[in-house]
Image (cartoon, grey):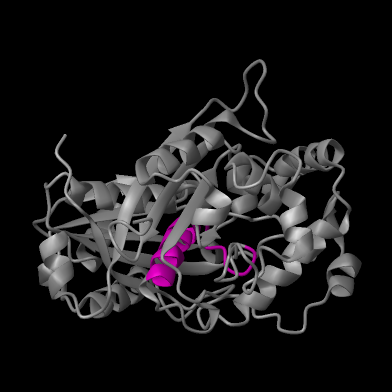
């Protein structure tokens, strides 16, 4: 398959809140898309194809939303694609959009992902439409306990991630939670949800959307703002259960990041990557993903958090936007990670900008930690020289 350089030239997102009662789903996606188009210096008529992603339809009880959103997203007479990979869908939606440009099929593609959790019941949906669901936290807590047991990490590591990400979120004008007064004590004293996860170590339920505009090299030259170059993409999956599966450090996660590193020429992720947006809906997933993506050695990820290395002013900042712990419109959460990485290398992340960021990665995972999407973006097409 032919491949040509792909650039992110437009990023837009909504203000995320517990309930966006001021807009319909159509209004929500248009809010994000219009901001992305404005950033790209484009109008609806400039877009050749639209890619739409969201979490399972049962989350809102709205079946096949792409049918009525085609009009809202200016897709009349144009190709429109629906992507679905559970919680990683936002990342996958961005990757599919980039591939349509990279393959030379379309010149300008709009990828949009959304969720309006206030109009549905995620707990009901996560239970497959049955009552008494343990929820995502209940499903992941055993993996987290296994990680703590294996690594010997102290219990305050999760609290530190919660504080760090919420302080970053307080710098993000679009974040749902802006908890500038959060402290370790407040996290520790918040109600226990799923042992060892406290309430303040868990993601919120948010309404929101994110949109990204992709174009080719020629389009990037005409863009009004600096582009982010898509250097590498990868998606992997694995069954939710099989003999020998390690859900604490899934093989699919390792394969996904290794494919990214091979494409870009990254041999030392900790040293060569400037910052990362990782899908961390529960605090302990930060050290777990640092290890599963080979940024830290096995059993060492928690030490990066503990030392402050993953803080905004650390040597490997993680979740500069505030991450999923600060905003969680599930279907859009992955694309928000990918968009933040792009903003960082474009130098357009505002108060949560990492100085001189040239190479960033973003990651999303979904379902029973079994679907993975990642990309690496750069300020140039060869940020490593």
Give the residue at x 66% y 61%. 203
| Image quarter hosting the N terminus | top left
Q: Residue furthest front?
A: 385
Based on the picture, tell me whether residue 114 belongs to the magenta stretch: no
Give the residue at x 32% y 52%. 231
Of the pair 98 and 317, the residue shown nearer to us: 317
Position of residue 139 in the picture relative to residue 315 (left or right): right
Asked if residue 50 can be seen in this view, the reply is yes
Give the residue at x 39% y 72%. 28
- Above or below, 38 relative to 9: below
- Above or below, 26 relative to 287: below
Based on the picture, tell me whether residue 339 belongs to the magenta stretch: yes
Asked if residue 177 can be seen in this view, the reply is no
Of the pair 142 and 258, the residue shown nearer to us: 258
Where residue 370 appears, x then y in whole percent? 55, 34
- Above or below, 314 relative to 363: below
Where residue 149 appears, x then y in whole percent? 86, 38
Q: In which quarter of the image is residue 262?
A: top left
Q: In which quarter of the image is residue 74?
A: bottom left
Which residue range is magenta in the image? 325-345
Count up the numbered dots. Answer: 0
Position of residue 234 in the picture relative to residue 227 (left or right): right
- Above or below, 318 relative to 82: below
Q: Specify the principal SS of the magenta part.
A: helix
């Amino acid at each position: 398959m032919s491949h040509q350089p792909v650039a992110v030239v437009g990023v837009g997102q909504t203000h995320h809140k517990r309930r966006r009662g001021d807009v319909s789903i159509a209004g929500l996606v248009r809010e994000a898309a219009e901001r992305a188009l404005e950033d790209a210096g484009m109008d609806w008529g400039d877009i050749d194809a639209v890619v739409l992603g969201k979490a399972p339809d049962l989350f809102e009880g709205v079946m096949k939303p792409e049918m009525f959103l085609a009009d809202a997203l200016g897709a009349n007479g144009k190709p429109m694609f629906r992507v679905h990979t559970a919680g990683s869908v936002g990342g996958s939606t961005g990757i599919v959009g980039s591939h349509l440009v990279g393959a030379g099929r379309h010149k300008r593609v709009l990828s949009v992902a959304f969720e309006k959790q206030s109009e549905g019941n995620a707990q009901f949906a996560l239970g497959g439409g049955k009552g008494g669901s343990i929820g995502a936290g209940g499903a992941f807590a055993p993996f987290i306990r296994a990680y703590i047991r294996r690594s010997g990490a102290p219990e305050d590591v999760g609290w530190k991630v919660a504080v760090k990400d919420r302080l970053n979120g307080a710098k993000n004008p679009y974040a749902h939670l802006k908890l500038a007064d959060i402290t370790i004590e407040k996290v520790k004293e918040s109600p226990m949800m799923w042992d060892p996860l406290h309430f303040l170590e868990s993601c919120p339920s948010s309404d929101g959307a994110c949109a990204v505009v992709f174009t080719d090299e020629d389009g990037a030259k005409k863009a009004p703002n600096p582009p982010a170059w898509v250097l590498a993409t990868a998606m992997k999956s694995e069954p939710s259960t099989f003999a020998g599966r390690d859900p604490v450090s899934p093989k699919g996660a390792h394969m996904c990041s290794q494919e990214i590193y091979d494409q870009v020429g990254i041999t030392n992720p900790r040293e060569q990557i400037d910052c990362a947006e990782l899908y961390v809906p529960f605090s302990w997933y930060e050290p777990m993903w640092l290890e599963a993506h080979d940024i830290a050695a096995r059993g060492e990820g928690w030490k990066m958090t503990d030392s402050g290395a993953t803080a905004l002013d650390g040597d490997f900042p993680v979740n500069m936007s505030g991450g999923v712990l600060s905003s969680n419109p599930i279907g859009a959460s992955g694309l928000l990670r990918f968009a933040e990485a792009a903003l960082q290398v474009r130098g357009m992340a505002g108060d949560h900008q990492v100085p001189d960021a040239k190479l960033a990665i973003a990651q999303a995972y979904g379902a029973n930690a079994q679907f993975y999407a990642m990309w690496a973006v750069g300020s140039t097409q060869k940020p490593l020289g």
